[in-house]
Image (spheres, rainbow, N blue to C red):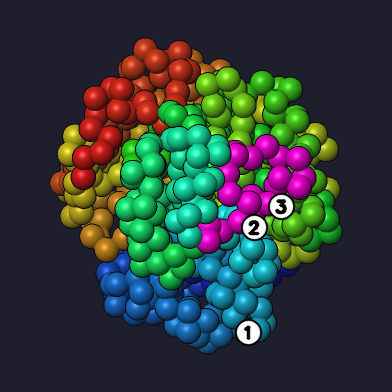
Amino acid sequence: MFEKILIANRGEIALRVICACKELGIKTVAVYSEADRNSLHVRFADTAICIGPAKSARSYLDIPSVISAAEITNADAVHPGYGFLSENADFAEVCETSHLKFIGPRPDVIRRMGLKQIARTAMDEAGVPILPGSKGVLKGLDEAQGLAEQIGYPVMLKASAGGGGRGMRVVRDPDQLGPLLAQAQAEAAAAFSCGDMYMEKLVENPRHIEFQVIADEHGNVEILGERECSIQRRHQKLIEESPSTAVTSELRERISGNLRVALKGIGYTNAGTVEFLMDQNGNLYFIEVNARIQVEHPVTEMVTGIDLVKAQIRIAAGEPLSSILPKKVELRGHAIECRINAEHPETFTPSPGRITGLNLPGGGGVRIDTAAYQDGVIPPYYDSLVAKLIAYGSDRSEAIARMNRALGMFVVEGIYTSIPLHLKILANPDFIAGKLDTGFLARMGIGAEKK
């Protein structure tokens, strides 16, 4: 087992990794920017190193600074969390050459899974259903026009190296294709330094379903059920739950079997998520692999009883899944997560600032992952996440009731938060009935496209 792990992240996920390390008896190193000097991950780590100014490009994304911090503190492994450098193959490679164990997939796997078209081909070959679309990167407008006519409008243009909704455009008629392709290429090149695009048939108002995967370094792969992530605004998830009301046990088993084959063929190791769209007929179609721990991993932990972050660390230390997981993984009960963001619940404008009053709810079946505290500051430089509120129940109704109770007792003063929006969503009859899709907020008239 590792003696000391550097956590190349901040906020609640850095605290989450610290908790796992403490339970495993592993010392921790926190890195922080000047804006995060008073953050809780700095306070609770065994060692903390300032790696630069507030801007993430000069701190949390500065690979030489992170590696130097690991070397001077004699860390023997690095946990990247999510975001920042978590899916940066170059960073994982530098960790390897610096004799630091990267707690995640191998660099070559991260690189291949980061190119959506390569991942799509690998899944297709393993029998995982994919949407009709391009077989590779689009070579130009002529090919795009011919393919769009063949699969039928509307179509979705996607950045091959993309994510988070950037480099994506919906094309509904031939006249839009040329201008929107140029826009998407420019946005992708600016965001990912790669303007390569591919095309898929657009599924109107799909459900967004993702499967949690975990694989050891001995060729063993396990699928830990699915999460429903359909409540989104501008491709950003707001509420997640497990299991999905739309996934039958037969569908879960079939997709899980296909994913085991695909991920073993890819050589995938450690934790990850495979994302799908579900059409109106209940058919699942692969969209991408997230080669890291997900923000919403707690809902899977609640229904499986498996600590995914500790599992990540133990896998990276060479342990087989047989010593980490129970003999049979079972989904018990239901869990829901609300992402509480520092933003106005109606206009969605960011609301950084000092928290002048705070009450964190508790009680049976309630979990909070947060780095917020009384008089703590939510800085304007990073993601606006204040906390992840997770409610667990014996069934979905109990989980919803507990979430409503917890949201009502969650007090954050000094800044705006998304709590009123979450309460409004949970009170909606369609949400209560499990009738979800990515057009949910727009149908509620909650200005899904406002900035």
Of pointers 1 and 3, the one earlier in the residue sequence: 1
Q: Where does the image place residue 163, in percent across and percent down from the top left?
A: 46, 54
- Characterize the local packing of mark 2: few (<14), some (14-19) or many (20 or more) Cα atoms within 10 angstroms: some
Report, in whole angstroms, how far the alpha carbon at label 1 lies from the one at label 2: 28 Å
Q: Where does label 1 land, which residue?
A: 98
Mark 2 lies on a secondary structure that is helix
Report, in whole angstroms, how far the alpha carbon at label 3 lies from the one at label 2: 6 Å
Kindly report which numbered mark, 1 or 3, lies closer to the viewer in this rendering: 3
For the point 35% across and 70% down, the residue is 56
Task: Kindly identify the amino acid type of the residue bearing the numbered disc 1.
Answer: Ser
Mark 3 lies on a secondary structure that is helix
Of pointers 1 and 2, the one earlier in the residue sequence: 1
Task: Kindly identify the amino acid type of the residue bearing the numbered disc 2.
Answer: Ile
Contact? badges 3 and 2 (CB < 8 Å):
yes
Q: Residue 425, located in which quarter of the rendered image? A: top left
Question: Is residue 123 a member of the stretch shown in magenta?
Answer: yes
What segment is highlighted magenta in the picture? 118-139
Q: Is residue 383 left or right of residue 149?
A: left
Report, in whole angstroms, how far the alpha carbon at label 1 lies from the one at label 3: 30 Å
217 and 29: which is toward the camera:
217
* Quadrant of the rendering where the C terminus is positioned: top left
For the point 33% across and 44% down, the residue is 175
Task: Kindly identify the amino acid type of the residue bearing the numbered disc 3.
Answer: Ala
Q: Where does the image place residue 413, in percent across and percent down from the top left?
A: 18, 42
Q: Where does the image place residue 378, in percent across and percent down from the top left?
A: 25, 56
User: Which numbered marker is on residue 118?
Assistant: 2
Q: Where does the image place residue 283, in percent across and percent down from the top left?
A: 62, 26
Q: Where does label 3 land, which residue?
A: 122
Dominant secondary structure of the magenta stretch? loop
Mark 1 lies on a secondary structure that is loop
Q: Residue 352, located in which quarter of the rendered image? A: bottom left
